[in-house]
Image (cartoon, rainbow, N blue to C red):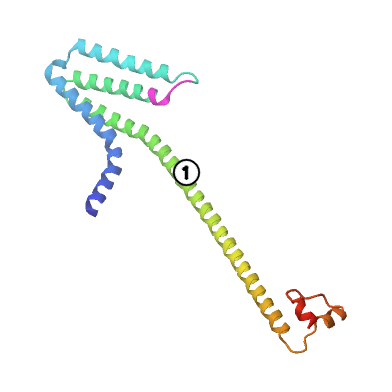
Amino acid sequence: MSEQIVARHWLAHITPKAAPALATTTVLALARIWNANGAEHSLGNAVLMTVLSLGAAGAGACASVGHAGDSTIAGTAFAASGALAFAGVAGYADGLPLPLLLWSVATAGAYGLAARYWRTDRRERVAHERHVSERREERTHVERVETIRGTTQIEVARTGAAYAESLAAALTARAALPGFDPKALTAAGLPELPGVDSSKERD
């Protein structure tokens, strides 16, 4: 079971890295199939791909102009323009050297563009993980401080209760001593002790 999880994790990491090469290879394969089915030296097909490529490039330029420009749409349009131009040349050419040369250039360009987005995504992911880690550490610190404060309050309450019990026991033991006279203590200037029964004072 663990081996399947590791394999899925490895594929999840390697698939985005292979996407640019897969895309350009797919375009090359489709263009060569198109070449074998009548696109070789076909002026009409070449003009069609040129118009489509220019249209996609124009759409990308329009999408990237102004403050409301969308970089994602612009990048997609420019990528489509390059793919159409690459497919047109690869379909029109009669040999493999030129299509392979264009495939290598297109693949390098695709990886160059993708690397920028990968770096941005990596920076955002690292920043998010750092923020989450800082929040977790702050929360842990607050919980630790609250735990210490609660424990301190409990210990203070226990100490106060123990002191009250000890004082009550001492007062009870002192009142039970023979010859104890609270009036004599009061006459000597000492404060009146609590918990002393007035009936005992009269006796």
Using the image, determine if residue 138 lies above or below residue 106.
below
Residue 30 image position (x, y, % from top left)? 18, 24
Mark 1 crowdedness (10 Å alpha carbons): few <14, some 14-19, many ≥20:
few
Look at mark 1 in the image and give the residue it sits on: 127
Q: Residue furthest bottom?
A: 178
Q: Nearer the viewer, residue 198 or 69?
A: 198
Q: From which residue to which does the magenta span run?
A: 68-73
Residue 45 image position (x, y, % from top left)? 20, 13
Q: Nearer the viewer, residue 161 or 119?
A: 161
Find residue 12 and report its image quarter: top left
Find residue 172 and report its image quarter: bottom right
Q: Nearer the viewer, residue 136 or 200?
A: 200
Q: Is residue 104 left or right of residue 122?
A: left
Quadrant where the image shows the C terminus: bottom right
Q: Residue furthest top?
A: 44
Q: Residue at x 75, y 74 (%)?
A: 194
Q: Residue at x 76, y 81 (%)?
A: 200
